[in-house]
Image: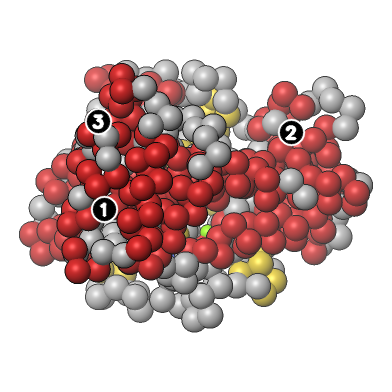
């Protein structure tokens, strides 16, 4: 809906303005942020409201009007202060002290009905002291892309932020990487926290161990509260962060997701995935697939992601060293590989149909699967989807019946690896009883949805919006993603 002018709705009835906001970060004092004002926009057209998130806030979607989103999140009435968070970060390997929220701010923090604290963080809400040369705005296409990425990743089991709302704001923006002028939006992200590795790096750069300690206490109190009363809570915090990040990157890898910009300012201290810019899902298993056109040296390519996350965790040790013993940090990080392998293995076996597989052949199957996907360059997602689509209990009877190769790869390209893969898969199925085939079929279907957010899919959605202002394919895609279709 569009609001030409400010409606006369009572703010006291707007559920977003009457939520019980907690000034958790604000209470730390202004060493960590600047108070900022939001931009004023010529247009306010609600394009996305994430009704699935509202119950988590204790709200019934039926009681939340479209106007409520607009008044709160693009007219920005009835709430302040808004906090532009200060941070630095390693960007493509270089330390950059010229960062911070340049086109967004922390709108507020609320406790979900699960008892957890959540941030509402804006993107595209105007200039701040950290905008530097930028306009402080988000393109509509950028908003559409982040909404889609977050929903798709969430459904694929990735621990991710979500988008609460996206509102078109009527400005013409100029961008080097989009046909311009291009349309504008403001997006509100609901995430566990916008405190980044780079938030700590800035305090180290400023030589403020006192502020590092204070921030760390805050992080443990709110996001690692089960550790708060432990004697060695700081070491335990870092050890758990390592585990969370290792599991997160394993989740991306299994989902075939390339984040594209794994700078330390895009790494959340809660180990949650967020900030979806030039990301892409891999079309095929190509270790060097690189999503950002400006990543000239493939630093953040698909297969580098685990190593980069490990490196970012290692870089974080520098600011944490004023609080945590070096030996504890090193012992924490040493477990990264084991956590990563365990999570990746478990997720990939699920994609292959097995909730739990103790068979000694499990690792062999994983290795062979990856080898086949890489050598054949069949569609990564297509391969697993075809397994789910064509699975039959007959596969247990003989290897020749397993995954008819023409379903995934032209018969002429049939390879020895593929034959071996079929033989092994058949052998593993024979570790199960015939009556367990149904549950394998269900596992395959659950973990391998048909719809994948490959670039051509996103582009076709965007073309409909850009050419025809037709939003139906966008909503349809979100619905399909939500139903794991
Ligand atoms: P990102 O690539 O979105 O993680 O942003 C990296 C840095 O650039 C952050 O400090 C952003 O706030 C800033 N930034 C990105 N785009 C803009 C923009 N259009 N206007 C102002 N600052 C921006
Ligand atoms: Mg960022």
Relative placement, left or right, of 42 versus 257 is left
The mark found on residue 62 in the picture is none
First along the sequence among labels 1 and 2: 2
Residue 151: quadrant of the picture: top left
- Mark 1 surroundings: few (<14), some (14-19) or many (≥20) residues within 10 A: many
Is residue 144 visible to us here?
A: no
Percent coordinates x, y for residue 143 in the rendering: 33, 54
Residue pointed to by mark 3: 393
Q: Residue at x 10, y 53 (%)?
A: 470
Q: Residue at x 25, y 75 (%)?
A: 179
Tag 1 and tag 2, C-beta contact below 8 Å: no
Secondary structure under badge 1? helix
Direction from residue 141 to residue 135 in the image, left or right: right
The residue sitting at the bottom extreme is 296
Q: Which sits in the foreground, 135 or 233?
A: 233
Percent of width and height locating residue 376: 33, 66
Looking at the rendered structure, the secondary structure element under dot 2 is helix
**Secondary structure of residue under mark 3:** helix
Residue lying at 74% horizontally and 33% vertically, measured from the top left: 220
Task: Tell which circle, 1 or 3, labels the residue nearer the N-terminal end.
Answer: 1
* Mark 3 crowd level (few <14, some 14–19, many ≥20, 10 Å Cα): some
- How far apart are the alpha carbons under marks 1 and 3? 20 Å
**For disc 3, does the CB lie below 8 Å from ligand 2?**
no
In the image shown, does 358 or 6 lie closer to the viewer? 358
Judging by the rendered image, the residue that carries numbered circle 1 is 382
**Quarter occupied by residue 391:** top left
Depth check, front residue: 185 or 192: 192
| Location of mark 2 (residue) | 220
Quick check: can you spot residue 267? yes
Rate crowding at label 2 as few (under 14), some (14 to 19) or many (20 or more) other CA atoms within 10 Å: some
């Amino acid at each position: 809906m569009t609001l030409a002018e400010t409606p006369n709705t009572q703010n006291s009835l707007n559920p977003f303005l009457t939520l019980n906001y907690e000034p958790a970060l604000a209470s730390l004092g202004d060493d960590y942020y600047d108070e900022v004002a939001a931009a004023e926009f010529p247009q306010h057209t609600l394009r996305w409201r994430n009704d699935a998130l509202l119950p988590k806030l204790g709200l019934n979607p039926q009681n939340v009007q479209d106007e409520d989103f607009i008044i709160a999140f693009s007219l920005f009435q009835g709430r302040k202060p808004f906090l532009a968070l200060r941070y630095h970060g390693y960007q493509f390997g270089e330390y950059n002290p010229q960062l911070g929220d340049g086109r967004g701010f922390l709108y507020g923090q609320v406790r979900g009905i699960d008892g957890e604290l959540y941030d509402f963080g804006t993107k595209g809400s105007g200039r701040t002291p950290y905008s530097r040369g930028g306009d402080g705005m988000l393109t509509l296409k950028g908003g559409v892309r982040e909404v889609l990425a977050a929903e798709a990743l969430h459904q694929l089991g990735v621990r991710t932020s979500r988008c609460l709302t996206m509102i078109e704001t009527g400005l013409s923006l100029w961008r080097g990487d989009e046909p311009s002028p291009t349309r504008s939006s403001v997006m509100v992200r609901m995430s566990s926290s916008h405190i980044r590795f780079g938030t700590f790096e800035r305090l180290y750069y400023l030589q403020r161990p006192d502020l590092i300690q204070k921030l760390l206490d805050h992080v443990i109190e709110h996001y690692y509260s089960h550790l708060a009363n432990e004697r060695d809570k700081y070491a335990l915090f870092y050890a758990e962060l390592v585990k969370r990040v290792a599991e997160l990157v394993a989740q991306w890898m299994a989902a075939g997701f390339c984040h594209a910009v794994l700078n330390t300012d895009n790494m959340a201290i809660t180990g949650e995935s967020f900030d979806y810019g030039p990301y892409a899902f891999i079309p095929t298993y190509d270790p060097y697939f690189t999503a950002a056109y400006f990543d000239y040296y493939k630093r953040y390519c698909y297969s580098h992601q685990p190593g980069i996350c490990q490196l970012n965790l290692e870089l974080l040790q520098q600011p944490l060293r004023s609080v945590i013993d070096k030996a504890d940090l090193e012992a924490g990080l040493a477990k990264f590989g084991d956590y990563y392998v365990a999570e990746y293995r478990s997720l990939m076996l699920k994609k292959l149909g097995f909730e739990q597989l103790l068979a000694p052949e499990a690792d062999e199957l994983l290795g062979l699967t990856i080898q086949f996907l890489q050598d054949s360059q069949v569609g990564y997602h297509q391969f697993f989807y075809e397994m789910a689509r064509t699975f039959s209990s007959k596969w247990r009877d003989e290897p020749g019946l397993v995954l008819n190769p023409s379903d995934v790869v032209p018969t002429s390209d049939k390879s020895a690896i593929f034959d071996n893969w079929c033989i092994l898969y058949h052998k593993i199925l024979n570790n199960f009883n015939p009556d367990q085939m149904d549950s394998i079929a269900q596992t395959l279907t659950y973990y391998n949805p048909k719809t994948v957010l490959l670039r051509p899919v996103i582009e076709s959605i965007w073309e409909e919006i850009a050419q025809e202002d037709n939003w139906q394919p966008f909503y349809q895609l979100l619905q399909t993603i939500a139903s794991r279709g």
